[in-house]
Amino acid sequence: MDLGLRDARAVVVGGSRGMGLATARCLADDGARVAVMARCVADLDRACADLRGRGSPEAIALVADAGDEQRVQQVFAELGSRWGGQLNILVNAAGPDVQGTFDELDDDQWRRAIDQGAMGMVHTVRAALPLLRNAEWARIVNFSAQSTQRQSTVLVAYTAAKAMVNSISKNLALLLAPDEILVNVVSPGSVASEALVGWARSKGADGDDPYRLMQVIAEHFGHPAQMPRAGLPDEVGAVAAFLASRRNSYMTGANVNVDGGSDFT
């Protein structure tokens, strides 16, 4: 399906790995001009080389920590100069790396989870809004998590940060509707990310097998979905790319689960 992305200008925050990279690939495959933002230069170089081999021959690496508002403002100002002051798509796919139960976490870990999981999104949206408003059409897609709907005790800070993403995104959808800037959320469930695959391997399981991966998750946390396997990053990326595209012309303020049917549990 043609998503209407030819020559669209897109930034994917957290786009150097995992579901963010999968989203960037989908956008590039449809002809978008893609910039990816992340902290690790090596990961960015690999991601941009991949995207340049697809439909984004001028893929741009943006080296920045989304938690650093001054750096984020600088990066978007430079990108705006390069792209004629316009941006069609902003995808926030980065998330916090904080795990632990309520009893285990100290204040610094809570602050890091909120900075990485929510304030980074605030910074990128704030910096991107002038460019988005200048464009003929614009979309914002923010990544949340299915764990905001089905709690895990070891993800309390992560989930709290993602709940902030949900609330802020809903409010942004209301604020930006008169400008016809659509704002939506993607909530992945158990997806074979690098972190989850690595965790499964630490338990002695083949994390590369999505069926075995789901079995290990079920053994430790209970079965989180109706599907018998974990999801794949590309499956989440395809949904995010649609929400970011011109083909999505009337959906805003939505939170889309990509989770193998957890709402039925």
Image (spheres, rainbow, N blue to C red):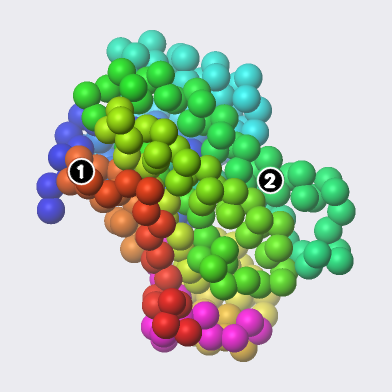
- Residue 22: percent from left, percent from top: 38, 52
Residue 87 location (% of width, % of height): 33, 25
Is residue 250 left or right of 134 when viewed as pictured? left
Along the viewing direction, whichever of 248 and 7 lies nearer the viewer: 248
Q: Quadrant of residue 257?
A: bottom left
Q: Bounds of the magenta span?
A: 220-233
In percent of width and height, residue 95 lies at 58, 49
In percent of the image, x 47 and y 20: which residue is there? Answer: 76
Residue at x 59%, y 49% (from the top left corner): 164
Estimate the x, y position of residue 172 in percent, counting from the top left: 44, 38
Residue closest to the far left: 2
Image point (34%, 14%), residue name: 85
In the picture of the structure, the residue carrying the numbered disc 1 is: 249
Please, what is the three-letter code of the amino acid marked with disc 1?
A: Ser
115, above or below 82, in the image: below
Q: Which residue is labeled 2 in the image?
A: 114
Q: Nearer the viewer, residue 108 or 228?
A: 108
User: For this view, does 169 lie left or right of residue 24?
Assistant: right
Residue 148 visible in this rendered orientation of the protein: yes
Residue 229 appears in the picture as rendered:
no
Please give the count of numbered marks on the rendered protein.
Answer: 2
